[in-house]
Every structure is written in structure tokens, then in C-alpha cells.
Image (tube, grey):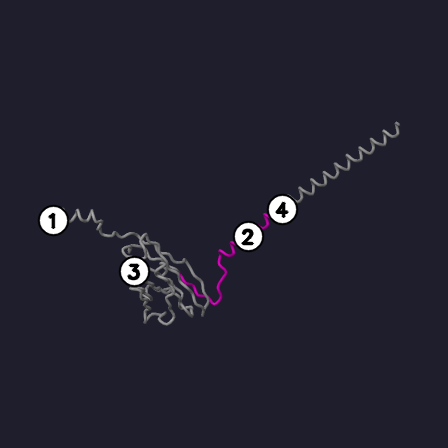
Amino acid sequence: MLTFLALASVVILGIVPKQSQAIVIYTGWERHALVGSDIRLSCSFFSWRWTSEDVTFSWTYRPDGSRDTLSIFHYTGGVPYVDNKGPFRDRLEFVGNPSRRDGSILIKNLDFSDNGTFTCDAKNPPDIVGRPSSVRLLVFEKVPIQAGVITGAIIGVVLGLLVLIVVIYYLMRFLVARRVFSLSVSKHGKKKKEGSQQRQIKV
């Protein structure tokens, strides 16, 4: 009887356990930066829930050529924590806005040794099931031209040539039509003049 009353109260009052749903985390795919510069690594998430007061963000780092993953940053309980023994202990700053689901970090004074993969994980209780997202950082002395920029330039040139060809084609058609019209008018006027002269001779 007590069990029945308990179940009934749960149904009536709507007191049901909150079920966890998937959370989707987003970062960039690859970032390029110059030695000595600063870079912002963005991390955000999508969740069906309102942003929880218990939202957390965690960042880890795996240097290129290494299998070891280092914890470099954690945000929990409204407080950001930077690992005080990692390679970014004096160069990492939290620049995100958790209330807007933003867990971005800023890494300052980049060096070649910072090349590696940065992984962000986020939890928005009760939504805690999700796959962390990773972004690869490449530090250069000079930022190379990306393949996408070259491809975009080539596509732009090709489209420009096509537009130019179309313009020239229609311009030529216009000039030819204008020339034909001028010749037709001139020929028609000449015939009319000759007819008028012949009528005057007969008279």
C-alpha cells in the first residue's frame, strides 16, 4: 500500500528523476599561429537543458609526437583552475563565458613546443554524456597560406574569366546587331532615294 501511494505521488506531482541526455561539444578543427603570438581556443556545447550552475569545462593537451595527455585547465563550481605544473601554467587564461556555454581559453606567447592537440570536454548536469572535441594547434615562424585560400583564389579567377567571356560575348552580339541594323537602315534609305529620283525623271 505504501509503495502504491509513493508511486502515485510521483505521478501526480511529477517528481521524476532527471534523465541524462547527450551533450554535443564544439571546437575548431585546426588553428595556425605565429611564434610569440596569443591564440584563443574556442569551446562551446549544445544541450537541451538550460545552462546548469554546475556546468564544467576541462581542457587537456597532448604534444605532437607524444602519447601522454596533460590536464591543463578545469572550470568547476564557477571557478577556473589552471594546472600549476603544466607547460601553460603562466600562459593560460580563461576567456570563456559559462553562462553562454563558452569554455574558451587563451594561450599566450606561443612557442614551437606548443604544437599539439588540445581537447575540450564539457558537462551540463544532468547532461553529462558527450564526446570531447579536439583542435590541433600548429605554431609557425610565418603562417603558411592555407590550401583553402589558394583554392578560393583559383575559383575566383575562373569565375572572373567566365564572367568576362559572357560580357564580351553579349557585347559582340550587341555590336553586330547594331551594325546590321545600321546597314539595313542605310540600304533602305538608299533604295527610297533611288525610287524618288526615278519618279522625278518620269515626271
Q: Is residue 163 magenta?
A: yes
Label 4 sits on residue: 167
The vertical placement of 107 against 194, above or below, is: below
Residue 68 seen in the current view: no
Q: Are marks 1 and 4 in contact (CB under 8 Å)?
A: no
Q: What element carries label 3?
A: loop
Label 1 sits on residue: 2
Name the disc covering residue 53, or none. Answer: 3
Q: Does the magenta stretch include residue 36?
A: no
Residue sitting at x 64%, y 43%: 170
Front label number (1 vs 2): 1
- The mark nearer the N terminus, 1 or 3, is 1
Label 2 sits on residue: 156
Query: Label 2, label 4: how many angstroms apart (C-alpha)?
Result: 16 Å
Q: Main secondary structure of the magenta part?
A: helix
Residue type at numbered disc 3: Glu
Residue type at numbered disc 2: Gly
Closer-to-camera residue (142/202): 202
Residue 160 seen in the current view: yes
Q: Position of residue 70 (x, y in %)?
A: 32, 66
Closer-to-camera residue (10/170): 10
- The mark nearer the N terminus, 2 or 3, is 3
Q: Give the range drawn in magenta.
A: 136-165
